[in-house]
Structure formats: structure tokens, C-alpha cells
Image: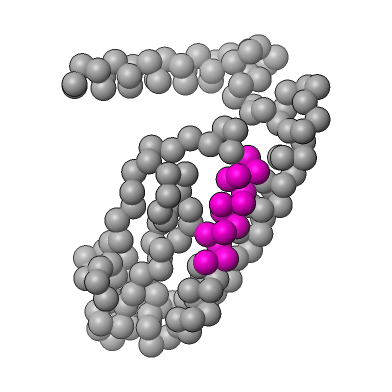
Amino acid sequence: MNKLVLLLLACVAAGAAAQATAPAGSHAAVLRAGPQHIAGNPGNADAGAAANAAAGAAGATLARIQALIGKASCSGDTECRTLALGSAACGGPTRYLAWSATETNESALRALGDAYREQQRAAAAAGAAGRVSNCRYQMDPGATCRAGACVPGGGDTLR
């Protein structure tokens, strides 16, 4: 099993190296650029624009989430929570943000988190042709209060 994993890793590394050093206009360079850059494929331009628009909306929503969380001030671990964020290719969140239950409006935060997840799904669906994932599930790290601020890690994930 270990030999198979090492062989697969070697093949992936060799392929990545070949694409990275490919001259412009070569087959590998076109693959690296993505399907939206292939001439004569008019549908790809629309899909790329839709993916970019959805990604832009997700970026704006993420900024609103971060502004709502603010400094995530706390005086103890019981005030800290985590928000599952994003949409991984194989399901589940892509990461978690720590937030303070005493400083943040939970219903507004959860609504923005849901909107962000849906925007990421839309962006992924619009540009799904080149989407790759390791399908690793992101565990909730929990959150703790350190130096007066909620931070991810070391907390009780059942809170």
C-alpha cells in the first residue's frame, strides 16, 4: 500500500513539473490555463463569467462575516463558538471561523454563513470542470478564549 501511494505521488509530482515548465501554446500550457481559455468553445466563456461572479459574491459575503465577527472578544472559553464555512467538493465545510457568542449576533452570522456556502456551491458548479478535491473532511476544531479573543482549536466541539 505504501509503495502504491509513493508511486502515485511521484506521478503527480512529475505531471505538475511537466506542466509548470511547458512552453506557452503547448498542450500542457492549455490544460494549465483551464478550459475557459480554449479557443472555439463559446460555452466556456459564459461558465467562466458565472464562476467569477459567484466567487465575487462569496468574497463580499466572507468580508461581511469577518466584519460581523470582529475581534471575537471573550473572557472565557464558554463564550467561544465556531462557524462552519464554505463548501468542499465532496461535501462539508472548507474551514471554520471562531466567534464570540457575547459579541456576535448568532442568527445574522449563521444566515451569512449559509449564504456563503451557497455562493461557493454556485461558483463551484459554474466552474466545476477543473475542480479537484482530496475529499478530506474538515473536523470542527472548536474554539477557545486566548488573550481575550476566541481562536480556533482546543475547544469542545459540542458547544
Residue 52, percent across and down? 69, 47
Between residue 129 and residue 145, name the one nearer to us: 129
* Quarter of the image that includes the N terminus: top left
* Quarter of the image that includes the C terminus: bottom left
Q: Residue at x 30, y 83 (%)?
A: 79
Q: Quadrant of residue 136?
A: top left
Q: Residue at x 44, y 77 (%)?
A: 71
Q: Main secondary structure of the magenta part?
A: helix
Between residue 3 and residue 76, name the one nearer to us: 3
Number of numbered labels in the structure image: 0
Residue 145, percent across and down? 27, 76
Query: In the figure, 47 relative to 91: above or below?
Result: above
Whether residue 70 is visible, yes or no, is: no
Whether residue 39 is visible, yes or no, is: yes
Query: In the figure, 70 relative to 142: above or below?
Result: below
Q: Is residue 126 left or right of residue 159?
A: right
24 in magenta: no
Between residue 42 and residue 7, name the one nearer to us: 42
- Start and end of the magenta stretch? 114-127
Q: Residue at x 63, y 18 (%)?
A: 29
Residue 111, percent across and down? 53, 74
